[in-house]
Image (cartoon, rainbow, N blue to C red):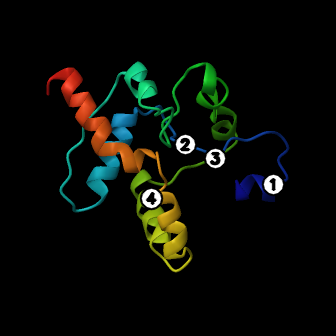
Amino acid sequence: MIRLAEQKAAGIYNAVGPSNKETMLNFVTKTQNTFDVESTLIQIDDYEFLKEHKVYYLVPWIPIDELSYGSARVSNAFSIKNGLTFRETKTSIKETHSWWYSDNLTDERRAKFEQKENSVLMKEKEIIAAWKKKTKI
């Protein structure tokens, strides 16, 4: 994007990736493999179930439905055609993690997000338990 600005390129450019289509599971697996921590992925691929539990999106996942019609269809093809390049997903994940736990954010601001009532973070165990009950995992 900096290069496009330096070249005084006009137009509307979407600067988000990935460079190629990627599933949410691929993204989450990359994230999981970025850090040396033990974790278990549980894929909930039933959007009706997620809506019942008030999970309408999880960044970077945006469902293709009437609520997210525009956001889920954003394309970066024009930007790529004009020279947009991407860095490794793991680099972005590590740098976002470093920023989140840096002095750039206060503990109060992190807590406001992480402990927000009715957020997916606060309801995760409940949602997973309901999913396991439904699917008899």
The percent position of residue 46, horizontal first and vertical second, equals 36, 21
- Residue under numbered circle 4: 115
User: Residue at position x 54%, y 22% from top?
Assistant: 64
Count residues near mark 1 (Cα–Cα under 10 Å), then give few for <14, some for 14-19, many for 20+.
few
- Residue under numbered circle 1: 7
* Mark in the foreground, 2 or 3: 2
Q: Circle 2 — which element?
A: loop
Number of callouts = 4
- Residue under numbered circle 3: 84
Report, in whole angstroms, how far the alpha carbon at label 1 lies from the one at label 2: 21 Å
User: Nearer the N terminus, badge 3 or badge 4?
Assistant: 3
Residue type at the position of mark 1:
Gln
* Looking at the image, residue 11 lies above or below residue 67: below
The percent position of residue 132, horizontal first and vertical second, equals 20, 30
Report, in whole angstroms, how far the alpha carbon at label 4 lies from the one at label 1: 44 Å
Q: Circle 1 — which element?
A: loop
- Residue under numbered circle 2: 17
Report, in whole angstroms, how far the alpha carbon at label 2 lies from the one at label 3: 10 Å
User: Residue at position x 20%, y 22% from top?
Assistant: 135
Q: Circle 3 — which element?
A: loop
* Mark in the foreground, 3 or 4: 4
When asked about the image quadrant of residue 5, the answer is bottom right
- Farthest residue toward the left? 137
Count residues near mark 4 (Cα–Cα under 10 Å), then give few for <14, some for 14-19, many for 20+.
few
Residue type at the position of mark 3:
Leu
